[in-house]
Image (spheres, grey):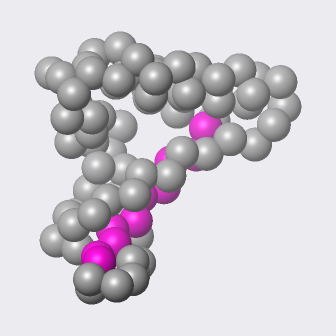
Amino acid sequence: MFPDAPTERGEKHIRELIKAKREGYDAAILFVVMRPDANLVIPNMRTDIKFAKAVRDARSVGVKFFAYSFFFDGRELHPFREIKVLI
């Protein structure tokens, strides 16, 4: 679940992507998940309802969502796999 703490900045960025999409630009959000055992990303409604609502609003205007899990081997960051974003 994301975020783990309220994020006014995160909500602001999503609102900017919504505006860009409405102006005709392509817009996407990439969640970088630092857990190779993760299976999906979900907006954390209990922690930040405004962020979760912004995510729903973004999806409704066509903002795309992607999430990839990564692992760090002590020297380099490695993509592991694409995971599902559940909105």
Give the magenta-colored segment's residue range: 63-72
Residue at figure coordinates x 26%, y 56% from the top left:
40
- Percent across and percent down for residue 55 are 44, 29
Q: Using the image as rendered, state which of residue 7 and residue 61 is in the foreground.
A: 7
- Characterize the magenta stretch by its predominant secondary structure: strand
Report the residue at 35% width, 14% height from top.
Answer: 50
The x, y position of residue 71, in whole percent, is 29, 76
Q: Is residue 24 left or right of residue 20?
A: right
Q: Position of residue 10 (x, y in %)?
A: 44, 28
> 15 or 71, which lies in front?
71
Say whether residue 60 is visible.
Answer: no
Give the vertical position of 30 relative to 61 (above or below). below
Instruction: Locate the C terminus and report the quarter of the image it occupies.
Output: top left
Query: Which residue lies at the image location 20% right of the left edge and 35% below the top edge?
Result: 4
Residue in the image at 29% along x and 49% along y: 41
Q: Quadrant of residue 86?
A: top left
Residue 48: image location, x then y, percent: 26, 20
Q: Is residue 46 magenta?
A: no
Indicate whether 72 appears above or below 67: below
